[in-house]
Amino acid sequence: MPFPLSIQSIDAIADVISGGVSGDGTPPIGIYRSAAKIEKFMRSCNVTFEVDGSRVPSLIQCLTELNNSPEAQLKLSRIIEASADPRDFFHDPERHAFVLEFLNRALGFDGYEVQQHGGRMRLIEAGKGGAVIAELAGLSGVIDFDTVSRDLDRALVSSQTDPEDAVTAACSTVESVCRSILIELGQPLPAKKDVQGLYNAVKQPLGLSPDRSDIDPLIAGDVRQILSGLATVIAGVGALRTHGGDAHGREKGFARIDARIARLSIHAASTAALFLIETWQRKFPSRPLPRAENP
């Protein structure tokens, strides 16, 4: 969905950041911020802002100017996500839930919504988040798996504005999981360090080889088919990264893929990564995964 946002969404964002107009007898929608605190909030979002007169009208004017600028999506996304940061609502989680509902009720008419992925808020196209992605983000945060979190965040942010980069980040998500598993097991990285080579290296220690014989015969064929399909999906994500991502450069002004294909890659990679992490936790419940940095 393109920017700019509607006037109603801009007003809703301003209400959440400022807490609304003071002295009208109603509780603040978000966190009540003085003029100085609003200026500080905007600076934290890399936006220069000074209150000129009344704090709420000044904020609305600033947001409106940003909304009509070439960098509207980048800057307003950052502001919206910061306005719903769960760390600001540690002592009032019910208010955080209300803020999300309030924002999404307005943003929904523009085709957007704010979702919490792990400890991070993300502005995405409405209905495009997906349960698997949210689960992976949350699990990555619980096990302190920052590399996966960074790759997934990058993929989600780029899916609409830079689908080629999103495909590259989606593939890196799976690679990061495989690397961490191999590091924790003390196994050497394979000679071929692409996503398919890394996945092939973790299949045996995780018991994911389709030819394993310890599965109930009633479902053995079904499991083999799914595991073979998983390998095909991972290989496809890697191939799309090579042919459509930006890992190996790109031609100026030419895009091979669109946001729809980028999201397909993100969902596929997230499903594979989540399955690998859950398999690790089931097989080695007392061993946390380390942080695996890409070379």
Image (spheres, grey):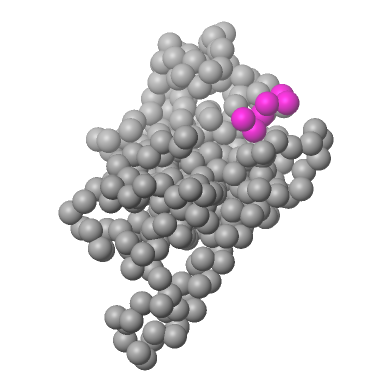
Q: Which quarter shows the N terminus?
A: top right
Instruction: Name the residue located 81 percent from the left edge and 40 percent from the top edge.
Output: 254
Instruction: Name the residue located 23 percent from the left edge and 58 percent from the top edge.
Output: 284
Query: In the picture shown, does residue 140 fall above or below 280?
Result: above
The quarter of the displayed image where residue 218 is located: bottom left
Say if the magenta span includes residue 72: yes
Q: Residue furthest toward the bottom?
A: 218
What are the residue bounds of the magenta stretch?
Answer: 69-74
Whether residue 255 appears in this view of the structure is yes
Q: Is residue 55 left or right of residue 280?
A: right
Q: Nearer the viewer, residue 173 or 13?
A: 173
Q: Residue furthest toward the right?
A: 253
Q: Nearer the viewer, residue 81 or 292?
A: 292
Q: Is residue 169 left or right of residue 5?
A: left
Q: Nearer the viewer, residue 198 or 166?
A: 198
The quarter of the displayed image where residue 36 is located: top left
Count of numbered circles in the view = 0
Say if the magenta span includes residue 4: no
Instruction: Name the residue located 60 percent from the left edge and 27 percent from the top edge.
Output: 75
**Residue 37, x across and y down, in percent:** 41, 15
Instruction: Name the residue located 34 percent from the left edge and 39 percent from the top edge.
Output: 291
Q: Residue furthest toward the front?
A: 191
**Residue 46, x across and y down, in percent:** 53, 18
**Residue 257, x across and y down, in percent:** 73, 50
Whether residue 26 appears in this view of the structure is no
Query: In the picture shown, does residue 24 fall above or below 128?
Result: above
